[in-house]
Image: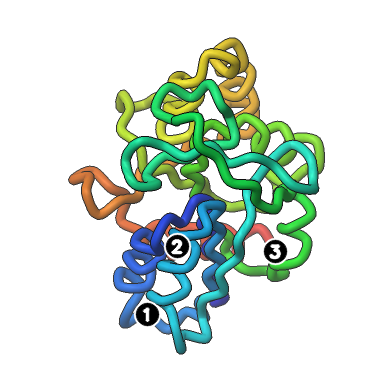
Amino acid sequence: MRVLFIDLGAYDGRTAELFLERMTGTEHDLTVCCVEANPEMELECRRRFVGDERVSVYGFAVAAEEGVTRLWMDNAEGHGSSIYADKRNVTEEFVEVPARKFSSFFEEVCILGAVTLLKANIEGAECDLVKDMEEHGLFDRVDALLGVAFGKRGNWGVGWVADMAKTPSLRPGIPDVVDILRKHEMRPFVFSGDIPRSVDIVKLVERLGREKDENK
């Protein structure tokens, strides 16, 4: 079975590496796409996966429009840099980085018939991601959403709206994002090596694979 893991906000590649480690021993054909906007973290991510043909690393910010955008640097060594200047942890320092809509990128990397997992931790740009996916019908082409942030158990937006809540200009849009996720019955799973209740990714992939086979 083919499995596509897309990691938006890959940072230095830790979450993607965890995915590969957890999937070790399975017979699945794995493809991993890491997207990181921060140039320094993108470089770290590339170093982590040197020689691993399963992994491709891309340097751009997910945004509402394609082109170039400012990435506002955070005050904790790149842990939360954002394209939104009013996110509460960013500074006045910024770098300009390529910007892409997720929908156009997805068309380049999607794999027909693959179990497709989408993890996002993009510091508020989840609002742009969700609206873009809704506009282009991508929720029907992604099998599961993953997040890494803490949140209340059962919260539809766990891991996807946490950074929107830290950004005053985005807070009013949280209900719309949650409504879209609920509409498509896409409750993000928590997937992180630092969180005890992280989803069992192997069991999740196998269940999604069975469901795809049953729906053929």
Vertical order, 162 against 169 (above or below) = below
Instruction: Give the percent coordinates (x, y) of residue 159.
Output: 42, 35
Question: At 63% across and 48% down in the image, what residue appears?
Answer: 61
Vertical order, 146 against 205 (above or below) = above
Whether tag 1 and tag 3 are in contact, CB under 8 A, the answer is no
Task: Measure how far apart labels 3 and 2 are at the Cα level.
Answer: 17 Å
Q: Amino acid at mark 3?
A: Lys
Task: Measure how far apart labels 1 and 3 are at the Cα level.
Answer: 23 Å
Left or right position of 96 against 36: right
Q: Amino acid at mark 2?
A: Val
Please give the label number shown on residue 144. Answer: none
Q: Is residue 117 something that shows in the picture?
A: no
Secondary structure under tag 1 reads: loop
Q: Which residue is mark 3?
A: 216
209 and 11: which is toward the camera = 11
Whether tag 2 and tag 1 are in contact, CB under 8 A, the answer is yes
Please give the label number shown on residue 26. Answer: 1
Q: Are there few (<14), some (14-19), or many (20+) residues within 10 Å of tag 2?
A: many
30 and 47: which is toward the camera = 47
Q: Are there few (<14), some (14-19), or many (20+) residues within 10 Å of tag 3?
A: few
